[in-house]
Image (tube, rainbow, N blue to C red):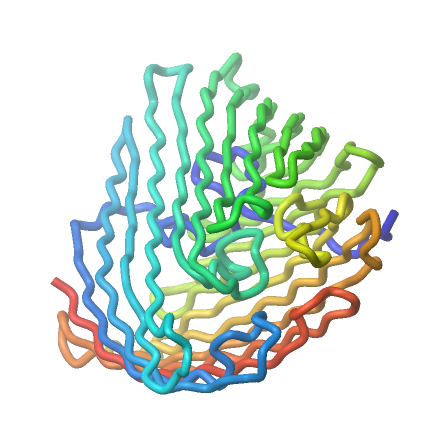
Amino acid sequence: MKIFKYTAGIAMLSGVASAQGLFDVNPNEIESESSPLRYTAGLNFGHDDNINPTSGAAEEDSTYVSGNLGVNLVVRGPQTSWDVSAVVGATHYLDTTSSDDTVYNARIAFNLNHRINERLRYVTRNFFNYGLDLGSFYGPITARQLEEYIYFSTDHAVGYRWTDRLATYTGVTYSTLDYDGSSNDVDSLGLYNTFRYTVSPQTVLTATYRYSNSEFGTGSDRSSQYATVGFEQKLTSSSYVTVSVGAQFASGTSPFGQVSYVNNINNQLKARLYARYSQEDVDTIFPIGGGLSERYTDKTSLRIGAALDYALSPQVTLTVGGNYTQSDFEGAPTLLDGDVDLFNAYASVAYKVNEAFSVSASVNHTTSDASNIPNRDYDRNRYQIGVNYSF
């Protein structure tokens, strides 16, 4: 079993721990104020120097044009808080020799926190993605896929306040990873219970037990259990940190840890950081030839990421960020044990011409270094300029 190197994590609006996604799944995660319904339309032109990095074929570069339409709404009330964000788009590659020169994407996040009475509340978090690049910031897939696929996760919990200090959240989770072919599909169902003890208005202690069962497209399944303890600390009115550590129990025992930090430092600066170390049940199935596939029964991943938004002026906003994922693959019947180190860094600048119209430019670099894992060793760079209109 591997050495526990780091801890990792995500903070949730409800305070209930989740194994799905990372901090960019919900762009409204830390919004405390309501914001009206807003649409954003974007048009971009760019260049990608490795458009199919995991295909196993020779590198191919292409210029591209892409368009997207997004919507965002945040409602924060004394009894009910909810938010929704969604985006749909398409990218058309102009220079590729592939017959499939247009790819599509869609992403939806919906979250609800409803207080039924003084003691009882209902919380749900839901995320849907269709596309090629789920990305390290959005979920468990670390590599660009060859065809669009669906990833969906949902979490429903009932919270009950037993005393002024003690509360519990009992919930059910479900996620599905659905590819064009069935061999790589994964369906996971989980049940959990979280105890929350309020030490002070700033500090909450947590303890969680979670059971999950994953069914794979290869016909196999795996059950696992988690036991963790942690805390949530409100540092200021606009910043907090969450920590959770423990163990996962499946075919063996593996350490688990997560930590996240979010801070709206001021009107100009926003920072987000996370790290997580855990066993994962997705992206573990690889072909062995003859139309057959095998599954690695033990995949552990360390994920670290950070993002910083800085308003240089009322018109200019700079965003920089990056993430690192290190995954170890073990336990396949005939495939050699392997590992993948993936690093991604990006930077963008946006200029607001007026309240509705803005222009932007961005650069994104990805390096993947793989050992005994096919088609995961590559470099990729993307350069893009775009315009956005909000209404």
Q: Residue at x 47, y 75 (%)?
A: 320
Say whether residue 188 is left or right of residue 362.
right
Q: Residue at x 47, y 58 (%)?
A: 134
Q: Residue at x 77, y 36 (%)?
A: 247
The C terminus sits in image quarter? bottom left
* Front position in the image: 17 or 186: 186
* Front position in the image: 372 or 68: 372
The quarter of the picture where residue 221 lies is top right
Say whether residue 358 is left or right of residue 147.
left
Q: Residue at x 31, y 75 (%)?
A: 92
Q: Position of residue 335 (x, y in %)?
A: 81, 56
Say whether residue 77 is left or right of residue 101.
left
344 lies above or below 266: below
Residue, far front? 290
The quarter of the picture where residue 348 lies is bottom left
Q: How many marks?
A: 0
260 lies above or below 322: above
Residue, far top? 162
Q: Position of residue 44 (x, y in %)?
A: 27, 78
Say whether residue 65 is left or right of residue 362.
left
Q: Position of residue 164 (x, y in %)?
A: 51, 18
